[in-house]
Structures are given as C-alpha cells and as structure tokens.
Image (cartoon, rainbow, N blue to C red):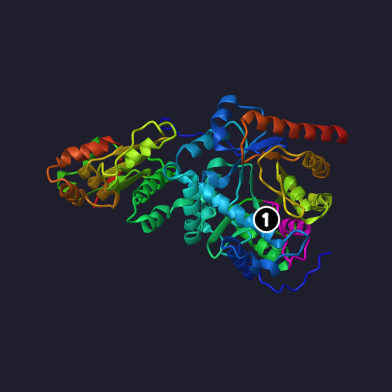
Amino acid sequence: MLTWSTNVTSLRELQVAFLDGTLHGYPAQLASLIAATELPREARIAIYANNAREGFLSALAATFPVIERLAGQDWLRQTGRDYMRRHPSRSGNLHFVGERFAAFLDDTMRGTHYEYFADVARLEWAYQEVLVAADHPSFEISALSSVSPDDYDSLIFRVHPALRLVESRYPVLAIWKANQPETAGMTPSISLDAGASRVLIIRREDHVELRELGAAAFALLAAFARGATLAGAFEQAGGADEGADLAALLGHIVKLQTLVDFETR
Amino acid sequence: MSPSPPRVVPAQRPIPARAGIGLRARHHDDLLRERPDIGWLEAHSENYFADGGAQIEYLLKLRELYPLSLHGVGLSLGSTDALDREHLWRLKRLMHLAEPGLVSEHLCWGSVDGTFANDLLPLPYTEEALRHMIRRVDEIQDFLGRQLLIENVSSYLQFECSDIPEWEFLAALAFASGCGVLLDVNNIYVSSRNHGFDARKFISHVAPVGVHEIHLAGHTVKPLERGEILIDTHSGPVCDAVWDLYDFAIERCGRVPTLIEWDAEIPALDVLVAEAARADAHMEHQRDIAA
C-alpha cells in the first residue's frame, strides 16, 4: 500500500533549485532538499555537477578537435567551463553543445593574437553540421535547357543541404588541414598573415570535402545560399571580383555539385 | 558510397530473448565485416538524429543484419518543462527509418527552464511526480503510436520529499500508463548500495508488471573520505554481484532481451560479444533449471 504525504516543495521548484545549485556550484542551497546520510550531501551533489560538466566538455572537445590541438586540452577545458556558464546546453542532444562556441570566441578573443580561433571554430561547427545534414542528388545542368533565356535573371538555385560556407581574414583552411590527426606536427607553421580564406564545406555521400573558393565563386554561392536570384547573385559575384567571368563561375559551382535544384521566380 | 537504390524495408524485427550489445560508432565497420553472433543491437536514439550522412547509412545497413532497439537518453521525460516536440519528431522519424523492435527512455529528468544537464537526474518519488510521469508517458506513447519501455536509473542521492519507494513508483507508472519496464540490473545494484535498500526486493516488486528488456553494465566504486559511492560509468565488465542479481532477475522475469552496455573506455568488439555470450549462457542455465 502506498502512502502519500504532502510535499513542501513542488516538482518544478525542486527541479529549478537542483539544476541551478548543481550547474552553478551552490550545493549548500540544496541541503534541505536532499536526504541526509552518512555521506555528505555535497559529495553526492558533486557527482551530478561532475557528470554535467564532463559530458559538456567531452562533447565540446569532440566537436572542436582542431581548436583543442591548437590551444591544448587544458585551455579548451578552462574556456569550455566559461562557455558552459554563459551558454549552458539547451538541448537533450549533446551534438548541439558547440552551436554558439564560435560566437563566444568572437566575444572573448577579439583583439588578441588568438582571435582566429573563432573562425577555426566556425569551420569546425560547419563540418559537424554537414556530417548530419540531409542528402540530396545533385542536379544536371542540362535541366536548365527547359528554362527560357528570358527567365534566366529570375532563376533561383537551391544549394545542397549538406553545404556550408565559411569566410575568414585568416588562412583557416590551411590551419584546419595542418591540424588533422594524420598531419599534425608534419606541416611547417602557418603565418596568420597568409591571407583570407573562403571555404566550401560539403558532404558528398559519407565524405566531407573542404575546398578553398575564389572571392567571386564564394560570393556567388553565398548569394544562392541566401536565396538570391541569378541576377542578384551575379551582381554579388561581380562586386567581389570585377573581372570575373560569371558564366564560367556558374559552370564551376555546378560542376562542384553544390546546387541541387532551381526554380524561376 | 554511391547513391542507394530504393530500399526494400524489412519488416520490424522483434528483439529476441537473447543478449545484444550497445551500438557504438567505433564498431560500425567491425560489425558489418565480422557479423558476430549476437541477438540484437541497441542504438542511442540521439546518436542517429541526423537528416543524412554516414551514421544513418550505417544504422540502415546494420538493421538488415540485426534486430534493432532504440534507447533514448535525452528526452528529459520527467522534466516539468513542456515536452520537446522537435526531439519527439526526430525520434518518430528515426523510428520510421529504423523500425525498432523496442523503444525506451529513462525514469528521470535532465532539464528545466530550457537548460539541460545532459544527465539522467533522479526524480523525487512523490505522488506529484508519479502523476506527472504518467501524463508524460501517455503523451509520448500517443505521439509515437507504440509502447515505450521505461528504465530505472542509477542515483547518487535521494530527495527528502520522496515518500514512495522507487520500485513502487516504477511499477505504478507501468501499471497506470501501460509502458513496459526496462530493468537495469546494474542500476538497481548501484542505487541499492548507494542508498542501502534490498536490490532483490526492487526486482521482485517490478517483475510482475512486465519487464521487456534488461540492461547489464559495469560500474565504478569511488572511495570518499567517509565510505564510498558506486557510479554507473559503463566503463568495464559486469561485476559478479550484478551477474548474481541478473540470475535472480531472469528467474523472476523469465528470459528477457538483455543488453550489454559499455559506453566508456569502449573495448574491442570481441570483448563485448564475449560479455553478451556470458549473458546468453546465464539465460540458458536459467532455462535448464526451470526445465
């Protein structure tokens, strides 16, 4: 036979107090909620605090292996704890823990020698996103023959769902490539002044490809990704490189299988 | 991988009353190549919450070789926040793809006010929490259109306001919501040692309501200044005391699909397969005794 008693604390109040005390390190405020035993309550609460922290930090390290290699495990753990305080997990799926890390590094590293970390993190997050993005067959350029030349300007291309674009004033792709498990320690150091990087990250079947794009090709693809018409995208690409052969650029990014569909507005 | 032809989806395969192993990414290729003789595989649902990509491809290939079960760790079932509809949609979509024989989650909560601990936090075992859990399990079973199994978790503290024994809470939840029980024998052992209750009493009380799956795993003993605490780490083999408790459980529940969980310091596949064979041997032995 079950016996029920009146609770002094609602389930909601208990959950709010418990998570706050555990994640923010105030075990004392939880004392009245937790049954007394021979083991101190703090030791019991510490297990949950530790689980939450270690789960978060391991997920972060798994998401940003290049940052970890560049800055070291200790730095990522310390920075990860600051990040966790400001941006605790907002999902039951630890995959999303790294979603705001690049923006956090923008804020905290700006003006330092390490401000390029934010763009490296952006590249690594894009990589994680394309790993789990949808598949889509690429489209054949011959399909465009059905479009009347009068409608070319209003063509809207849809980019591959497993495609991301990352632009940086730093050579982030070279940094990323030099810090893969198979290359780490084998590449000469890279100068941060080596120039800007415009990276296409795309998954084809189960393989993620990272490729440097020229300024005009990047601008064209970025415009398509934003939903621009062909006329609008050509304008963007021409703005990025006045001498660009726009028709050849379009052929280039179609060949890279970055576009999956089109419509006319 | 080249574009796949239209896939002939095999019918949902029930999970046999044998031992299976937890599916981890590092074993994907080994499983496809070696096809070890194990009864089934259990995937953590959230690991396959993808719109596409290699993980999903592996899952679809493996489901053609083994019956699959989906085990969630992130739904935060007992939270007083609204249920995460996107999480549920993703689970439902994954179920459509994977056609699992069993779908399970935990008797726990993990988030409030939208902030997640990403851990399996214990509930206070009160009437309010029981009513809440019954409503939530009802809602989820309605949404998913099938029975959910609910697993007992390991815990390291008990709430002062708890006034229902955990085993009575779990049995009442199963009775009222129609969910099945996923009996984690290692979790019972860990919690019984941490809180000083009788693990056999837990099992005896829950067995009659319908145990559809059993979990076995390794734990870690953490020494403290005064005493020690057992932590559910899933980082080693099942200990002798848990095997004994497992014998007691299958004596009460009969032969039940049994999972070997080993999620940290993950060993080579053959170590897991050997641990699963050991669970199978315990079930065979139990059948011989019963006969």
Residue B280 found in image quarter: top right
Magenta-colored stretch includes residue B155: yes
Q: Could you tell whether B214 is left or right of A159 in the image?
A: right
Q: Disc 1: which chain?
A: B
Residue at 75% across / 51% down in the picture? Answer: B228
Query: Does residue A224 sit above or below B61 in this rendering?
Result: below
The magenta segment is: B150-174
Q: Badge 1 local density, few (<14 within 10 Å), some, or many (20+)? A: many
Q: Which residue is mark 1?
A: B107
Q: Nearer the viewer, residue B88 or A81?
A: A81
Q: Could you tell whether A25 is left or right of A43 in the image?
A: left
Return the x and y of residue B39 as percentages of the image width and height.
67, 33
Return the x and y of residue B249 as percentages of the image width and height.
80, 44
The C terminus of chain B, quarter of image: top right
The N terminus of chain B, quarter of image: top left
Q: Could you tell whether A49 is left or right of B152 in the image?
A: left
Residue A108 found in image quarter: bottom left
Name which residue type carries label 1: Leu
Return the x and y of residue B183 as percentages of the image width and height.
73, 48
Under circle 1, the secondary element is loop
Q: Is residue A52 visible?
A: yes
Q: Nearer the viewer, residue B103 or B142?
A: B103
Residue at the left extreme? Answer: A243
